[in-house]
Image: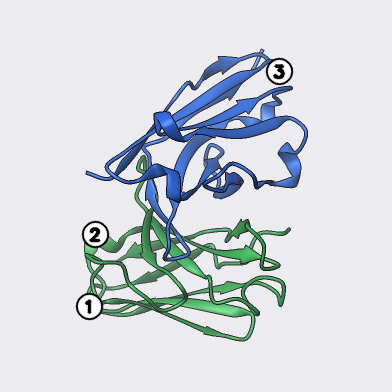
Amino acid sequence: QSALTQPPSASGSPGQSVTISCTGTSSDVGNYNYVSWYQQHPGNAPKLMIYEVTKRPSGVPDRFSGSKSGNTASLTVSGLQAEDEGDYYCTSSYAGSHSYVFGTGTRVTVL
Amino acid sequence: EVQVVESGGGLVQPGGSLRLSCAASGFTFSIYWVAWVRQAPGKGLEWVANINPGATEKYYVDSVKGRFTISRDNADNSLYLQMNWLRAEDTAVYYCARYGYNAAFDVWGPGTTVTVSS
């Protein structure tokens, strides 16, 4: 299974919005609503931000939202704040199995 | 507090073996899928393996099949990863992660570092 494709970088000024794409295939993103997103700050473990395409775990600000269209999922961060800087990864189950594939990762910079 | 903590990482020569452990606490370990995810230096996340609650189903990324074995001890709330025939490309931080009923990796440990080098 190949890694899901994400843009290497994205940026925005404080208060602006940034959207990160995650492109897969009909074997993963396109056919299953088990897409999740993770935030990782340097030297730290990943943190779950979005699950099942659009849902936010308790404690995650509503500035974070997810969506999906066809084989591409997206994460939008609205009202960017300095603490939103970091690396973001998507993941999906593969072929409906209990195998998983992560995205290539996107570094978000707050200008 | 719900948490998982990895241990067992270290420096090993190519071709060598290492066993990683993950201690879970604060939740009913025996009813969850759990997984190993790794991150090579400066690289992205890679799912490595996972195991179902009863240890009857195990899945691996192609690059570790036949070399790594995932296992668990529900009585001890522990997850393991036996790594044999290690290669330089296995060098990474290895994370233990719970796969929750929200269909996502919702609890992560701080990671343990494995370095494969002569």
Q: Label 3 amino acid?
A: Pro
Q: Is residue B115 above or below residue A75?
A: above
| Image point (67%, 62%), residue name | A97
Q: Are marks 1 and 3 on the same chain?
A: no
The disc, 2 or 1, on the residue closer to the chain's N-terminal end is 1
What's the chain of the residue with tag 2?
A: A
Amino acid type, residue under disc 2 in the picture: Glu
Q: Residue at x 71, y 59 (%)?
A: A2
Q: Which residue position is annotated with label 1?
A: A15
Q: Is residue B39 above or below residue A109?
A: above
| Mark carried by residue B14 | 3
Give the SS element for disc 1.
loop
- How has the structure been colored for display? by chain
Residue in view at x 44 percent, y 69 percent: A10
**Which image quarter: residue B17?**
top right
The chain letter under disc 1 is A
- Give the camera-side residue of B33 and B91: B33
Q: Are marks 2 and 3 on the same chain?
A: no
Calculate the distance from the C-alpha at mark 2 to the C-alpha at mark 1.
Answer: 12 Å
What label sits on residue A83 in the rendered view? 2
Question: With A13 as the anchor, is B111 left or right in this view?
Answer: right
